[in-house]
Amino acid sequence: MKKLDIIYEDKNILVINKPAKILTISDGKTEHTLYSAAREYVKKQHKSNKIFIVHRLDKDTSGIILFAKNESLKKELQTNWNKIATRYYLAIVEGKLPTKKGV
């Protein structure tokens, strides 16, 4: 994986733009994931630093991934995720569709 595309970072969170074709977390077969790269990044700052995954995106999906830098924040964010986060998916298609938008 190329250099992390860090959108925002402070003492509590790390926000990364995940490219398509990379797993957010391991599937048991793949070692190089966004999580492993983020973990390596925070460990370079200080060996005792930790990172916690708050949510995931599918391998083929690009988008914003939020990591917590402590477990209590991770739990709080996950508990309230549907209240604080909105997901939008945009697909690029070829050809003429019968409607401009839909589900």
Image (tube, rainbow, N blue to C red):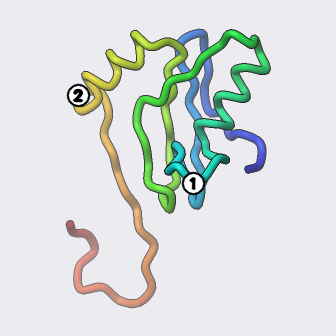
**Residue type, numbered disc 2:** Lys
**Image quadrant for the C terminus?**
bottom left
Q: CA distance from mark 2 to mark 1?
A: 33 Å
Q: Residues within 10 Å of mark 2 (few under 14, many from 20)?
A: few
Residue ID for mark 1: 29
Residue ID for mark 2: 83
- Vertical arrangement, residue 2 with respect to residue 40, above or below: below
Residue 39 spot, x, y in % from top left: 65, 28
Question: Mark on residue 43?
Answer: none
**Residue type, numbered disc 1:** Lys
Task: Determine the residue positioned at 43% across, 79% down.
Answer: 93
- Of helix, strand and loop, which one carries label 1? loop
Q: Residues within 10 Å of mark 1 (few under 14, many from 20)?
A: few
Task: Determine the residue positioned at 32% across, 33% down.
Answer: 85
Residue 55 spot, x, y in % from top left: 40, 36
* Disc 2 to disc 1: CB gap under 8 Å: no
Q: Which of the two residues, 19 or 56, is positioned nearer the viewer here?
A: 56
Q: Which of the two residues, 62 or 74, is positioned nearer the viewer here?
A: 74
In the picture, measured across the screen, residue 14 lies left or right of residue 101, that is right
Residue 96 spot, x, y in % from top left: 35, 89
Dividing the picture into quadrants, the one containing residue 22 is bottom right
- Of helix, strand and loop, which one carries label 2? helix
